[in-house]
């Protein structure tokens, strides 16, 4: 009797930020809420893959879920800049076509990753910022939010403390959210989104919207999303390094990500976290921090969700 063909493998990996912090800044009730948020985002993307949807749709859905959750530093939970404003950014990239869309300097867009997707599909450019990005959002029928939507009580309190003590390290830090996925058609995709670092100067742009910096996807090699100190991630071209180590050095996705975490660590010091997936469905979740909010699910296997890197 002939064997029935096996179901194509599919997988989604997400992150909600990596940071080195005092464990006391994340009490049990907050840890539980963060895990619940990760589970919801993972489920949003997994359901799309499970029914045969695209990796692109899955990563967008997962990231939108975290953008809507004020516990994550993206969209509604974006950190305040030094002027008390929330400026967000995002990018999305399709590994099948090498097309992408990126946006930055957003103050009114509820879901930056949705606007990034529209830039990819509806715009002749691949990156829009500030007023031009808002104008494009309106032209595409997106409803803009009042700035008060993004200003949560927790972020406001941290901003006030930042003004008073610029040297203090905060639990949210420079978190980012991101997702990578492999769909049943063999395509990979990535989406990354953030509110940036707390107390940043107005107009600062981070790695989340930079192709090859915080995000990269190519069907032949991998999809990778980064989080941590944006300046060093951009200067180290971290997501592209994962790609290059896989493509030119032949490393596994896990070894490539681990090597990228330590790349130029003497010159580019700071927090780094990477999630990645290759065309065979192998994944990586690597960081040099004690906190890495992360989750994944492969096929119909049980999901994995955790925030502490010392947990097995």
Image (cartoon, grey):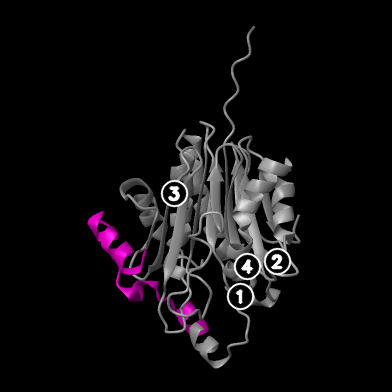
Q: How many other residues sit within 10 Å of disc 4, few (<14), some (14-19) or many (≥20)? A: many
Residue at mark 1: 171
CA separation, marks 4 and 1?
Answer: 19 Å
Residue where numbered disc 2 is placed:
289
Q: Kindly state the secondary structure of the residue where label 4 is placed.
A: helix
**Label 3 secondary element:** strand
Quarter the C terminus occupies: bottom right
27 on left or right of 99 = right
What is the secondary structure assignment of the residue under circle 1? loop
Label 2, label 4: how many angstroms apart (C-alpha)?
15 Å
Quadrant of residue 267 within the rendered picture: bottom right
Q: Residue 246 appears at what percent x and percent y? A: 68, 43
The stretch of residues the image draws in magenta is 129-158
Q: Main secondary structure of the magenta part?
A: helix
Q: Quadrant of residue 15?
A: bottom right
Label 3 sits on residue? 100
| Residue appearing at x 52%, y 82% in the figure | 158
**Residue of label 4:** 232
Q: Nearer the viewer, mark 3 or mark 1?
A: 3
Q: Residue at x 46, y 43 (%)?
A: 56
**Outermost residue, top side:** 1
**Mark 4 and mark 3: span between their CA atoms?**
22 Å
Q: Residues within 10 Å of mark 2 (few under 14, many from 20)?
A: some
Relative horizontal placement of residue 41, taking residue 20 as reference (left or right): left
Question: Which of label 3 and label 2 is nearer to you?
Answer: 3
The number of callouts visible is 4
Q: Earlier in the sequence, mark 3 or mark 2?
A: 3
- Rendered view: 203 above or below 190: below
In which quadrant of the rendered image does the N terminus lie? top right
- In the image, is residue 198 above or below residue 122? below
**Magenta segment includes 136:** yes
């Amino acid at each position: 009797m002939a064997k029935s063909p096996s179901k194509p493998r599919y997988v989604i990996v997400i992150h909600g930020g990596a940071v080195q912090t005092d464990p006391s800044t994340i009490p049990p009730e907050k840890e539980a809420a963060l895990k619940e948020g990760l589970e919801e985002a993972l489920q949003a993307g997994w359901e799309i893959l499970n029914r045969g949807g695209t990796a692109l749709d899955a990563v967008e859905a997962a990231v939108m879920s975290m953008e809507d959750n004020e516990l994550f530093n993206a969209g509604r939970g974006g950190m305040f800049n030094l002027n008390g404003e929330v400026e967000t950014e995002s990018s999305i990239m399709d590994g099948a076509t090498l097309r992408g869309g990126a946006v930055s300097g957003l103050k009114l867009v509820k879901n930056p990753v949705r606007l990034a997707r529209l830039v990819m599909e509806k715009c002749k450019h691949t990156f829009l910022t500030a007023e031009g990005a808002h104008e494009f959002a309106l032209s595409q029928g997106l409803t803009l939010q009042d700035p008060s939507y993004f200003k949560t009580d927790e972020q406001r309190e941290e901003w006030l403390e930042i003004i008073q003590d610029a040297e203090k390290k905060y639990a949210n830090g420079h978190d980012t959210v991101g997702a990578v996925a492999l769909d049943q058609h063999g395509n990979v995709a990535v989406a990354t989104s953030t509110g940036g670092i707390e107390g940043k100067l107005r107009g600062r742009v981070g790695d989340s919207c930079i192709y090859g910096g915080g995000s990269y996807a190519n069907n032949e090699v991998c999809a990778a999303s980064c989080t941590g100190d944006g300046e060093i991630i951009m200067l180290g071209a971290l997501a592209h390094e994962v790609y290059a180590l896989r493509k030119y050095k032949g490393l596994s996705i896990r070894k490539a990500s681990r090597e990228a975490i330590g790349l130029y660590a003497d010159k580019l010091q700071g927090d780094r976290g990477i999630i990645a997936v290759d065309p065979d469905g192998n994944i990586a979740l690597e960081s040099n921090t004690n906190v890495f909010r992360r989750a994944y699910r492969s096929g119909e296997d049980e999901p994995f969700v955790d925030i502490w890197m010392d947990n097995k």
